Image: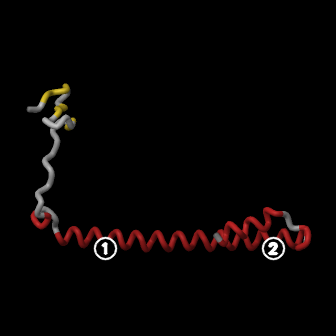
Amino acid sequence: MASTLGRGCTIDSEGHPSPPNAMAPPPNDTAEWVDPAAAAAAMEEASARAQHAVVVIWTLFAVGVYVTCLRTYSRIKMVGVKRLQPDDYLVWVAVVS
């Protein structure tokens, strides 16, 4: 027996609350409610988005490495290799990791 909490929420016989107008769970046979064409289209779109994300990530990484190379080059020209500071080395640790 379900008891009412107010505003349409109820508690079932096991003591679990349910939101108002809760939908019934889908049937056990997924073939009845999954459209194969829609599922294939969704997978294709997800794959295209993943490919785009990979391109963006590698492009940003390349830009970061390029800027780090320019920074290291300018530091070597300004102070020389022997007077580089720890942050000049740590930036390459960050790039490699």
Residues packed near mark 1 inside 10 Å, few (<14), some (14 to 19) or many (20 plus): few
Specify whether 90 is left or right of 63. Answer: right
- Circle 1 residue: 44
Return the residue at label 2.
73
Residue 32's spot in the image, x, y percent?
Answer: 9, 64
Instruction: In the rendered view, tell whether residue 85 sits above or below residue 1.
Output: below
Instruction: Decide which of tag 1 and tag 2 comes sooner along the chain.
Output: 1
**Quadrant position of residue 95:** bottom right
* Residue at left offset 45%, top offset 71%: 52
User: What residue lies at 19% left-to-right and 32% top-to-bottom?
Assistant: 9
Q: Amino acid at mark 2?
A: Tyr
In this view of the protein, which residue sits in the foreground, 12 or 91? Answer: 12
How many labels sit on residues? 2
Q: Residues within 10 Å of mark 2 (few under 14, many from 20)?
A: few
Secondary structure under tag 1 reads helix
Kind of element beneath mark 2: helix
Q: Quadrant of the N terminus?
A: top left
Location of the C terminus by quadrant is bottom right
The amino acid pointed to by label 1 is: Glu
Q: Residue 36: image x %, image y %?
A: 17, 71
Measured as percent of width and height from the top left, residue 78 is found at: 89, 68
Q: In the image, is 10 to the left or to the right of 72?
A: left
Residue drawn at x 15%, y 51% as measured from the top left = 25
Instruction: Please give left or right for residue 45 compared with residue 24 in the image.
Output: right
Residue lying at the far front of the rendered structure: 14
Q: Are marks 1 and 2 in contact (CB under 8 Å)?
A: no
Q: Residue at x 72, y 70 (%)?
A: 92
Numbered circle sitting on residue 16: none
